[in-house]
């Protein structure tokens, strides 16, 4: 969670600083990153869909750690989309842009922290349930289909 939190804020800084815009201004790099994001999300959806009768929790010998969380956010295309919408989609303090950015960071984190702890709790709660293999496959199918819908929407928006 700490790595995800740091990573989310680093992505926000990349968006606010213009680094993301500068990188995405290069058409070849933008296309490469787009294809890599689509491939990664498709890979995840495939792993979830074919997890069998176990809910698609990826078993690890150890927790991914802070660097793993930072890396996950750094390659998460949704993080860039959300932060771009938040920081560029509307302004409410044109007379003090620095304060507006600070307030947006505070608002974003005030929302992000409880939501991610709720997701963590939900994942633990679902894992403890004694679901039938059929129900687990249905949940995996729904999660994989949802992820592929996001992939298709992203592809449609790009073209």
Image: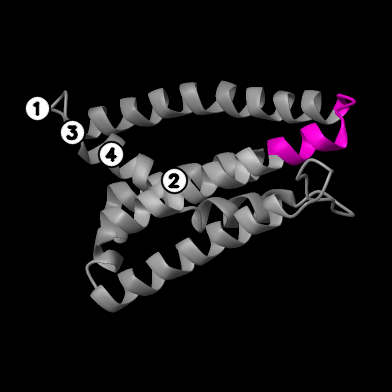
Q: Secondary structure at mark 4?
A: helix
Within 10 Å of disc 4 (Cα), the crowding (few <14, some 14-19, many 20+) is few
Q: Secondary structure at mark 2?
A: helix
Does the magenta run of residues contain 33? no
The location of residue 51, given as percent across then percent down, is 78, 52
Q: Tell which circle, 2 or 3, labels the residue nearer the N-terminal end.
A: 2
Q: Tell which circle, 2 or 1, labels the residue nearer the N-terminal end.
A: 2
Within 10 Å of disc 1 (Cα), the crowding (few <14, some 14-19, many 20+) is few
> In the figure, 150 relative to 30: above or below?
above
* Location of mark 1 (residue): 95
Q: Nearer the viewer, residue 85 or 20?
A: 85
* Location of mark 3 (residue): 97
> In the figure, 70 relative to 101: above or below?
below
Residue 134 seen in the current view: yes
* Location of mark 2 (residue): 79
What residue is rendered at 50% in x and 53% in y?
Answer: 76
């Amino acid at each position: 969670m700490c790595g995800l939190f740091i990573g989310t804020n680093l992505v926000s800084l990349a968006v606010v600083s213009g680094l993301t815009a500068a990188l995405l201004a290069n058409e070849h790099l933008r296309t490469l990153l787009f294809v890599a994001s689509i491939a990664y999300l498709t890979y995840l959806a495939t792993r979830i869909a074919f997890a069998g009768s176990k809910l698609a929790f990826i078993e690890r010998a150890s927790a991914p750690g802070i660097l793993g969380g930072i890396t996950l956010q750094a390659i998460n295309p949704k993080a860039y989309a959300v932060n771009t919408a938040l920081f560029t989609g509307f302004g409410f303090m044109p007379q003090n842009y620095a304060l507006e950015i600070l307030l947006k960071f505070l608002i974003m984190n005030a929302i992000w922290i409880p939501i991610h702890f709720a997701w963590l709790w939900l994942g633990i709660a679902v894992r403890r349930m004694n679901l039938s293999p059929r129900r687990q496959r249905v949940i995996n199918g729904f999660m994989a289909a949802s992820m592929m819908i996001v992939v298709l929407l992203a592809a449609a928006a790009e073209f």
